[in-house]
Image (cartoon, helix red, strand yellow):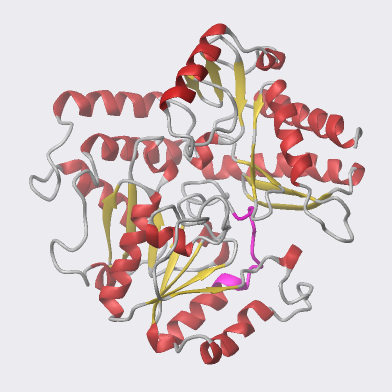
Amino acid sequence: MLTGNESASVGKARGNMSRDLQFKRDQYVARGISNLAPVFAKSAKGAVIEDLDGNIYIDFYGGIGVINAGHCPDIVVDAIKNQAEELLHTCFMVTMYDSYVNLAEKLVKITPGNEAKKAMFVNSGAEAVENAVKIAKAYTKRPGVIAFEAGYHGRTLLTMTLTSKVKPYKHEFGPFAPEVYKVPSAYCYRCIFGSTYPDCGLHCLEYFERFFISEVDPSNIAAMIIEPVQGEGGFIVPPREFLPGLKDICEKQGIVFIADEIQTGFGRTGKMFAVEQFGVIPDLMTLAKSIASGLPLSAVVGRSEIMDAPTPGRIGGTYGGNPVACAAALATIDFMEKENLSEKAAEIGQKITAVMEELQQRYARIGDIRSLGAMVGLEFVKDPKSKTPDKEAVAAIISACFQRGLLVMGAGIFGNVIRFLPPLVITDEQLEQALHIFAESVSEVLDTK
């Protein structure tokens, strides 16, 4: 069984099995599929991964936010096995089954808000976003959608349009979906208005007065979609007033407010869902990633009157809400609740942030630390005054961590953020070891530059 207590230095070695498979991967897998590190996983448990050559890595990106409950939790593996022995697929739209209905009931009960709600299931985060927008358009009979700079919502045509980062996600893939309007996000470290919070009065909210005059009439907007904490955009945590302010604007203008909780949901931020940290009840929520411990599943959950706007047959999909994935999700949520993983996330986040703040005292090139629960990001700059993004330092630190047996990954529209998404079941010893490796790696890179 993997423990993560093995010598982290084993991450330096690449054996013959990895090299041979890398050759085959280069020969047969499309170049457009990128890889963070040259690691081929053999097995994983909790917060650690073992590769084909026996190297052990502490996982600090958790499948990009998918493994909040840890790799291969026993209760989830058992649920998958039991369900697979009885039913793999029928297509819920043809022949129904209980796990779909039971999971819909569970999500309705644990998502914010006491009003009547309903849920539907598809396979990926992008599909959930696509369907949420479709549902909003059916409900409002309006065509437009508002999205935010630095947001990430997927790689399909519509979600790629909603996504802010051009390279690599949008470059050469146009034309894009029509009637999508971008507004500035509450990226306080790089405020587009040149303001400083909290003295700014939240110009990012005030901007909507001008926006609805200069860009689009609000009567044309069906939905506004935002990640409560922008993930790929750089782990941007907005001021506490920002999301409630957006919800007020939506209510005033009859716009459906969609919270994209695909990366922030299921305990990551110290609450089951990040919007709970801001006291906001969305009209619709998109959920995926950690919902089923890695099985392909996503959901749209929201107010019944909005969810029921599309007539039968207008939403759904062949594989959406697969019985095995639904069984895994029910077991995952049960595990999260019993183990109080939301509380654990808050504790993990505090420990990580404390170490990062100590590093920041030593290295001014750590320009900003942003965190909400166990969702922590560090923005690196070449100079704290100019705030010039230091993408090269991030790449070097990620590589140094890999050599020591820690898997971390980058983020940010400028590519200068390192994000931490450790499994919430990580042990104290594994966390301490990971933070030691990271501090060592930062010192190696920044002390030599």
Judge left or right: residue 14 versus residue 217.
Answer: right
Determine whether 242 is above or below 407 in the image: below
Q: Which residue is pictured at 44% across the width and 87% down the height?
A: 218
Q: Foreground residue, 237 or 410? A: 410
- Split into 4 quadrants, where in the image is the C terminus? top right
Judge left or right: residue 15 versus residue 132.
Answer: right
Name of the residue lying farthest toward the top: 16
Residue 330 is situated, as x and y percent measured from the top left of the image, at 31, 40
Q: Is residue 246 magenta?
A: no
Q: How many marks?
A: 0
Determine whether 3 is above or below 28 in the image: above
Residue 56 is situated, as x and y percent measured from the top left of the image, at 60, 16
Q: Foreground residue, 435 or 14? A: 14
Determine whether 432 is above or below 364 in the image: above
Q: Which residues are magenta?
A: 233-243
Name of the residue lying farthest toward the left: 95
* Residue 301 can be seen, yes or no: no
Q: Foreground residue, 10 or 199? A: 10
Quarter-of-image position of residue 242: bottom right
Q: Is residue 235 magenta?
A: yes
Residue 371 is situated, as x and y percent measured from the top left of the image, at 67, 51
Residue 112 is situated, as x and y percent measured from the top left of the image, at 42, 62
Q: Which residue is pictured at 36% across the width and 47% down the height?
A: 124
Quarter-of-image position of residue 311: bottom left
Determine whether 54 is above or below 341 in the image: above
Quarter-of-image position of residue 120: bottom left
* Residue 147 can be seen, yes or no: yes
The secondary structure that dominates the magenta segment is loop
